[in-house]
Amino acid sequence: MVSPRVLGYLGRAMSHELSAVQQYLTHAGLAKLWGMDEVCEHFRREALEEQEHAERLTNRMLQLGAMPNASQLTPVRAGPSLIELLEADRLLELRAVELYREAAQYCALIGDTEDRALFHGLHDEELTHAREIETWLDRLRREYALAWNR
Ligand SMILES: [Fe+2]
Ligand SMILES: [Fe+2]
């Protein structure tokens, strides 16, 4: 029998991933409106990755006999510039890292190796997302600082 708390983590994770899909699709759309085609493509790929995470969670829930039921998505955070979009995405990814860290730790504690592996894998991928965004943000901020001082 799967622990109700593990099912709770799976449910929260589903809500997170679907919210992330919504946010990245929105950021892709904004980038397109701003004429930033490469940035748009980048956000579209992110949305697909988050959708694949939702798929992994869906399949695990079905294996456990549970139906995915995410009914509350987090509202999209955006802003008037690429830096603000990336800052919002950084927060989104850090929240996911925290959720998956806690979920993996709990599964380890109760000896649920399969769900621990699932959450741990997702944790590492979200951490990579967060770090990529931080690198991108650092670069953009340096470029703006240089342009400002010219
Ligand atoms: Fe994700
Ligand atoms: Fe992510």
Image: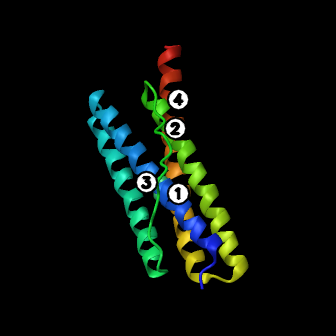
* Circle 4 or circle 3, nearest the eye: 3
143, above or below 71, in the image: above
* The N terminus lies in quadrant: bottom right
- Measure the alpha-carbon separation of dots 4 and 3: 32 Å
Q: Which residue is mark 4?
A: 142
The response on whether ligand 2 sits within 8 Å of label 1 is yes
Q: Secondary structure at mark 3?
A: helix
Please give the name of the residue rendered at 51% of the width and 54% of the height, measured from the top-left corner: 16
Q: Quadrant of residue 98?
A: bottom right
Residue assigned mark 3:
18
> On the rendered structure, is 48 left or right of 116?
left
The residues tagged by marks 3 and 2 sit, at their Cα atoms, a distance apart of: 16 Å
Look at mark 2 in the image and give the residue it sits on: 88
Check if mark 4's residue and mark 3's residue have beta carbons within 8 Å. no
Comes first in the chain, label 4 or label 3? 3
Q: Amino acid at mark 4?
A: Arg
Callout 2: SS: helix
Report the residue that reaches farthest toward the bottom. Answer: 1
Q: Residues within 10 Å of mark 1 (few under 14, many from 20)?
A: many
**Separation (CA) of disc 1 from disc 2:** 14 Å
Callout 3, which amino acid?
Leu
Which tag is nearer the camera, tag 4 or tag 1? Answer: 1
Are the residues tagged 1 and 2 within 8 Å (C-beta)? no
Near-viewer residue (127 or 33): 33
Q: Which residue is mark 1?
A: 126
Disc 1/disc 3 C-alpha distance (Å)? 14 Å
Q: Can you give x and y, in whole percent of width and height, for residue 122 in the image?
A: 52, 65
